[in-house]
Image: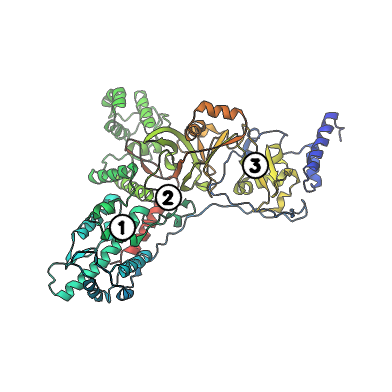
C-alpha cells in the first residue's frame, strides 16, 4: 500500500474521531476502511447533482408513511450481525371499487307511539295526522340509513304534515317538487328525487288519506336526499382512494325538516344548500350553455402530427377552429393570414406564428409543432366529454366549503397551476409541478401555517426505502458525502457508514434529512400546511421542469415556479423581504392570517372572469368518479 500523506492521515484520523464522538454503533471493517481511505461511491463533499443519475431531487411522497422508531434505551443490532433483509417497496394509496351504501326500508312502526303535539299547519290537527299513520302499514319506502332514522325521529317528535294541507298538496310541496325537478341544472339526476304526486281524481276519503301520508313521507325522504347531495355530494370521495381526504359536512336532518315546516320559502331554502361561490355558479352556467349548444362539427384527427413544411388535410380544420375562436388581439395579428391561408393543407412558415400564438393562448409551450396535445387544446373535446367534466367538477366542488375563503391559495393539479386569490382578484398565478402518476398528489384542503427559509428536507420513508436503500446497501457512506444527516430515535447523529442498511427491508429506524443547500430537494423555501399526506409547496432545483406542458413529475408535493412570490403573498409582504430572509440562513416564519389552501383536482374550472377551461385528466380520476356515481345511481334506481 502506498504511504499516506500527512494531510490525508490527519483527515482520516479526524473522520474516525468524529465517528467515535458521535457514539455510532460499531462499523464493519469494510465500512471503517472506506471511511478512512475513501469508498467508491463518490467524492467527499460531492452534491447529488454532481453524481449523474443517482441524485434525489425528489420531494416528500404523496402519502409518507411514519417511520418505525426505536424506543429509548434500545439500539439496532450492530452492522453485520443480521441477515440482509429483502427490500419491500412502500407503495401509495390504491383506487377502490366504489361500493355505495345500500338503502334501507323506513320503519314507521314507532310513529304510533308519538307524543301529542300541536301540528304545524293551520287547521291541521294531531288527530288527523295520527289517523293518517295507518296508511303507512305495508308501505315500503327506501331511503339512506341516516335519512330513514331522521325521518322517523322527526315525525315522532313533530306529528304533523309539512307538505299537505287538508287533503291537498300545499304550496310548500309544489316549490319543493319544482326544485327537485330542476336538479339537472346542478349536475344532479332528477330521477334520484322523483316523488309520485297524488292524483286529484281519488275521492274516497280513506284512500285519499293513505295517498297523502305516503306522499308526505316520500317527499321528506327525497328532500333530505337532495339537501345531502347538494351540500356534500352524492358520494363519499374518501371511499374512492386514500388520495382523497375530505371531512364530512355536518347535516342535522331533523333540524332541516323543522326549518322546512316553518318556512314558506321552500325553494330558497333548498337552493341555499348548494355551494354559494362564484365558481359553482360559473360551472352551472357552463353546463346550461353546453346543453343548449350544438355539437362541434369540426373534428380534427386527435393523432395529428405536423411540422412546418409538412402537409395534411387535417390542417384546414385546425385553422378554422382557431379562426372561429379569435379574440381581438389574435384577430388583429393573424386574422389576415388565416383568411388567406385558412384552407391550405401545407403548414407553411407564415402559419407557424399563428400556431405558436394559439398554443400559448391555450397555456402550452408555443413551439409551433402540431401534435396530439395541440389538437386537444385547440380542437377541444366533444360536447359530451365537456358536459361530463363540468358535472364532475360540480360534484367535486360540493365536497369543499361553500365559501372558499379570502385570501386563499388554489392549486389545480390538472392545470399545473397555483394561484393566490384575495378579494376576488387573482394576485399571483404560477406554474407548478405535481406528483407523478405513480406518486400522485392527494386531493384535499387545509390551512397554510408556516414558511421555512433554506429548509431541511426530511426524507420520507418511501423514498428512503424505494430509492435510496438499494444504493445504501452498496455504498453505506453515501448519505454522509451527499449532505444528509442520519439520526436515531433520540435525535443522535449516526454516520451513515455505521448503519447496517442491509438489515432493513421496509421499516428503517433512522431519520434522514438533507441539509440546506443549493442542491437541497426543496430548494430555497417551502410553504407548509401540516397534513397527514406530508404534502406542501416548495421550490426546486429542477427549474427546467416548468417549461414542460405535462408537469406530473414529482414525488407528490407541489413545486412552484415562483416560490418567493407565493411566500410573499401568504405572508403579506414583499419579494425583497423574502430575499432578505433567505440571505440570513435557515429560519421559519408563522403565517398569522387564516389562509385556506386547496390542493384541488378539477378537469373543468372557471378562470376569474368565469370562463370555464378544460384540462387533461392526468390521474384518470374523472373515470373513477364516474364509476362511483354509477354505483350510487344503481343503488338508488329501485327506490320509491
Residue shown at 83% from the left, 32% from the top: 10
Label 1 or label 2, whichever comes before in sequence order = 1
Residue 21 position within the rendered picture, expressed as x and y whole percent measured from the top left: 79, 41
Q: Which residue is mark 2?
A: 621
Q: Nearer the viewer, residue 249 or 55?
A: 249
Label 3 or label 2, whichever comes before in sequence order = 3
* SS of the residue under disc 1: helix
Q: Which residue is mark 1?
A: 226
Task: Say whether residue 475 is left or right of residue 188.
Answer: right
Label 1 or label 3, whichever comes before in sequence order = 1
Count numbered badges in the picture: 3
**Alpha carbons under labels 1 and 3: distance apart:** 50 Å
Task: Say whether residue 536 is left or right of residue 250.
Answer: right
Residue 203 position within the rendered picture, expressed as x and y whole percent measured from the top left: 12, 72
In the image, residue 136 above or below residue 227 = below
In the image, residue 576 above or below residue 276 = above
Q: Which residue is mark 3?
A: 513
**Alpha carbons under labels 3 and 2: distance apart:** 33 Å
Which colouring convention does the figure follow? rainbow
Quarter that holds the C terminus: bottom left
| Mark 2 neighbour class, 10 Å CA radius: few under 14, some 14 to 19, many 20 or more | some
Which label sits in the foreground, 1 or 3? 1
Amino acid at each position: 500500500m502506498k504511504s499516506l500523506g500527512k494531510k490525508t492521515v490527519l483527515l482520516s484520523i479526524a473522520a474516525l474521531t468524529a465517528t467515535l464522538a458521535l457514539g455510532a454503533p460499531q462499523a464493519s471493517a469494510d465500512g471503517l476502511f472506506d471511511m478512512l481511505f475513501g469508498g467508491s461511491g463518490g467524492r467527499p463533499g460531492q452534491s447529488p447533482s454532481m453524481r449523474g443519475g443517482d441524485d434525489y431531487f425528489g420531494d416528500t411522497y404523496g402519502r409518507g408513511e411514519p417511520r418505525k422508531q426505536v424506543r429509548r434505551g434500545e439500539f439496532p443490532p450492530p452492522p453485520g450481525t443480521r441477515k440482509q433483509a429483502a427490500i419491500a417497496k412502500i407503495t401509495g394509496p390504491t383506487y377502490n371499487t366504489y361500493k355505495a351504501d345500500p338503502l334501507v326500508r323506513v320503519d314507521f312502526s314507532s310513529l304510533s307511539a308519538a307524543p301529542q303535539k300541536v301540528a304545524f299547519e293551520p287547521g291541521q290537527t294531531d288527530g288527523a295526522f295520527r289517523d293518517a299513520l295507518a296508511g303507512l302499514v305495508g308501505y315500503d319506502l327506501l331511503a339512506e340509513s341516516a335519512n330513514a332514522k331522521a325521518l322517523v325521529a322527526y315525525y315522532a317528535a313533530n306529528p304533523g304534515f309539512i307538505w299537505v294541507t287538508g287533503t291537498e298538496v300545499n304550496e310548500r310541496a309544489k316549490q319543493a317538487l319544482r326544485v327537485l325537478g330542476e336538479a339537472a341544472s346542478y349536475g344532479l339526476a332528477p330521477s334520484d328525487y322523483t316523488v309520485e304526486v297524488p292524483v286529484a281524481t281519488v275521492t274516497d276519503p280513506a284512500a285519499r288519506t293513505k295517498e297523502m301520508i305516503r306522499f308526505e313521507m316520500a317527499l321528506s325522504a327525497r328532500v333530505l336526499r337532495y339537501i345531502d347531495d347538494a351540500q356534500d355530494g352524492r358520494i363519499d370521495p374518501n371511499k374512492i382512494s386514500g388520495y382523497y381526504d375530505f371531512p364530512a359536512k355536518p347535516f342535522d336532518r331533523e333540524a332541516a325538516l323543522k326549518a322546512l315546516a316553518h318556512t314558506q320559502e321552500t325553494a330558497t331554502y333548498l337552493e341555499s344548500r348548494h355551494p354559494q361561490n362564484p365558481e359553482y355558479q360559473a360551472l352551472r352556467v357552463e353546463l346550461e350553455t353546453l346543453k343548449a349548444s350544438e355539437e362541434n362539427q369540426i373534428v380534427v384527427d386527435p393523432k395529428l402530427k405536423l411540422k412546418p413544411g409538412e402537409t395534411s388535410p387535417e390542417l384546414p380544420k385546425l385553422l378554422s377552429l382557431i379562426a372561429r375562436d379569435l379574440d381581438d388581439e389574435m384577430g388583429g395579428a393573424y386574422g389576415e393570414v388565416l383568411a388567406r391561408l385558412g384552407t391550405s393543407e401545407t403548414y407553411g412558415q407564415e402559419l407557424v406564428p399563428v400556431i405558436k400564438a394559439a398554443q400559448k393562448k391555450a397555456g402550452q409551450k408555443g413551439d409551433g409543432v402540431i401534435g396530439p396535445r395541440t389538437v386537444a387544446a385547440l380542437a377541444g373535446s366533444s360536447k359530451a366529454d365537456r358536459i361530463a367534466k363540468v358535472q364532475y367538477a360540480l360534484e367535486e366542488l360540493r365536497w369543499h366549503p361553500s365559501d372558499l375563503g379570502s385570501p386563499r391559495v388554489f392549486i389545480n393539479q390538472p392545470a399545473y397551476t397555483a394561484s393566490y386569490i384575495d378579494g376576488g382578484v387573482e394576485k399571483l398565478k404560477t406554474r407548478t409541478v405535481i406528483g407523478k402518476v405513480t406518486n400522485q398528489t392527494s386531493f384535499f384542503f387545509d390551512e397554510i401555517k408556516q414558511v421555512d427559509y433554506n429548509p431541511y428536507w426530511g426524507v420520507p420513508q418511501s423514498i428512503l426505502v424505494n430509492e435510496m436503500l438499494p444504493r445504501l446497501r452498496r455504498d453505506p457512506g453515501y448519505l454522509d458525502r451527499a449532505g444528509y444527516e442520519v439520526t436515531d430515535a433520540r435525535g443522535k447523529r449516526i454516520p451513515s457508514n455505521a448503519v447496517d442498511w442491509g438489515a432493513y427491508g421496509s421499516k428503517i429506524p433512522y431519520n434522514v434529512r438533507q441539509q440546506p443547500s443549493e442542491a437541497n430537494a426543496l430548494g430555497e423555501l417551502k410553504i407548509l400546511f401540516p397534513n397527514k399526506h406530508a404534502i406542501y409547496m416548495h421550490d426546486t432545483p429542477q427549474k427546467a421542469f416548468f417549461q414542460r406542458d405535462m408537469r406530473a413529475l414529482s414525488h407528490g408535493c407541489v413545486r412552484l415556479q415562483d416560490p418567493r412570490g407565493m411566500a410573499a403573498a401568504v405572508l403579506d409582504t414583499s419579494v425583497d423581504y423574502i430575499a432578505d430572509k433567505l440571505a440570513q440562513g435557515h429560519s421559519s416564519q408563522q403565517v398569522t392570517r387564516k389562509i385556506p389552501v386547496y390542493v384541488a383536482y378539477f378537469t373543468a374550472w372557471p378562470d376569474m372572469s368565469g370562463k370555464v377551461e378544460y384540462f387533461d385528466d392526468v390521474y384518470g380520476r374523472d373515470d373513477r368518479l364516474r364509476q362511483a356515481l354509477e354505483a350510487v345511481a344503481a343503488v338508488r334506481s329501485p327506490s320509491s
